[in-house]
Amino acid sequence: MTSKPRDGLTAALGERLTERMAGGEDEAQAVARARDGDPEAFRLLVERHSRDVFRLAFRMTGNEHDAEDVVQEAFLKAYRKLDAFEERAQFGSWLHRIAANCAYDLLRARARRDQGVERREEDESDPMLAVPSGAPGPDRLLVGGEVRRRLKAALARMSALERSAFTLRHLEGMSIAEISRALDLDTSAAKQSVFRAVRKLREALGEHVQWGAAP
Amino acid sequence: MGSGSLTHPTEDELVLHHWGEDDGPEVARHLQDCADCRAALAALRRDLQAVPVPDPPHRGEDYGRHVWLRLQPRLAAEARARRVGRLRPFRARRPSSRLFVPLAVAAALVLAFLVGRHWPHPAPPAAISQAARERILLVAVGDHLERSEMLLVELVNAGGGDKPVDISSERQWAQELVGANRLYRQTAMRAGEPGVASVLDELERVLVEVAHRPSSLSAGELGQIQHRIESRGLLFHVRVIETQVREKEKEGTQTPVPGGKVVS
């Protein structure tokens, strides 16, 4: 984009694509154009999906700054892997899996960094510890401070994998199969990670019941 | 017990049932007849509801545009690297060895810095102020990370077919980066920056691996290196540190050691 006329043409093309995509029309076409090396088409995909990717990244990392890094990395990775994108798939779902993988990488790096180090104040603002807005919760939420303290303990005991798998399943509504693809695991490992996370959560909440043998 | 089947579902099975991911209809059937298991499922649901669904910080309508503006230079660099990769032979893409002269000087400064920091001197060297040394160090580390990133990008994008790939240029490049990387890793470790040291450690393993490989790799061998880079998010972590170093460089920070944390 070195000259004005070309800018104008590209912008016009971009506007037309934006209009079509705003109407929910043919995202696949934008993906195809991006695969052919059209940066405007990729820009439209970035602009369309950024907020959703940020939401996922924030929920997984619990940190605004980290989430921004994940957004950047996810789009960069998606750009590199466009050739591998299967046309029949949903671009948004594919992108979310990439973003989840980036966030998981970041959580692992953070876990390595925090090894043997007391976690810092950022935990206090962990979104998983926020009181939910809107819907009425269980009675325990009336003693929110205690629940928060226990949730914090549960989150601290979860590995990066467990927290990632649990967040994707519980907060993002991804299926176990999608989680396994996003985190490069087999289905059984993804499932076990979710189970372990739920177990830790319930143990920390203090009402964990062993009903496997006889309820 | 009042259940229609003999075996009560386990907690894990109830978890799967809660999310509609049962392996079969047995749990649902059992729950129809077993009040205890229904109570257990209700307790599980109460516990899960205690975990709030957090609202992310607000991002306005133009957020996508901001993301694009930040992303665009990196995509352009990527596209440029691909174009260069297609037009020029692999071996021609290695940066000139003269680039490593300043790196060697910077590495020597790091060493001098370490010596000065950990072994007390009766009188500090007067030629270069501490602030200047820190700045040179930050610039050198930033450049080292940038070159490492370029090498990783080349490796990740190399190959693509079944034919053997010539990595002689990348191998030599890795050999040149290993020594400086080791020095920076040790600096980060001594300065109490385990996050930075950990990323540099992982980077060093890849550099050493590439440096010791033969010049020609099969697609499978190259794939192993690419998998190692991608599966551990190495490129991502290197970029994060590089960004932080560059930011510190701009701020003219007083912190005596590169890097800051891998994440905030």
Image (spheres, helix red, strand yellow):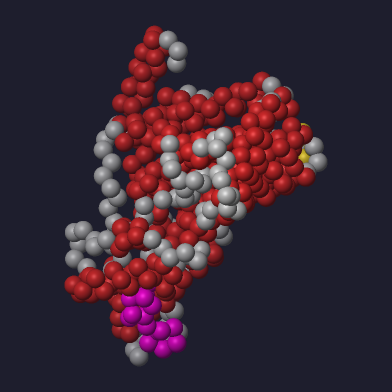
Which residue is most to the front? B122
Image spot of residue A121 (x, y percent): 34, 60
Magenta segment = A201-215
Residue A170 picture quarter = bottom left
- The residue depicted at 30 percent of the width and 58 percent of the height is A125
Residue A44 picture quarter = top left
- The residue depicted at 67 percent of the width and 50 percent of the height is B205
Q: In this view, does A18 lie to the left or right of B222?
A: left
- The residue depicted at 37 percent of the width and 39 percent of the height is A49
Which residue is most to the bottom? B1
Image spot of residue B70 (x, y percent): 41, 32
Image spot of residue B91 (x, y percent): 74, 27
Taking the magenta stretch, the answer to whether it contains residue B32 is no
Residue B133 picture quarter = top right
Taking the magenta stretch, the answer to whether it contains residue A204 is yes
Q: Quadrant of the N terminus of chain B?
A: bottom left
Q: How many marks do you count on the picture?
A: 0
- The residue depicted at 39 percent of the width and 29 percent of the height is B69
Magenta-colored segment: predominant secondary structure: loop
Asked whether residue A72 appears in the rendered view, the answer is no
Asked whether residue B258 appears in the rendered view, the answer is yes
Image spot of residue B48 (x, y percent): 32, 69
Q: Is residue A192 left or right of residue A5?
A: right
Asked whether B113 or B221 is in front, the reply is B113
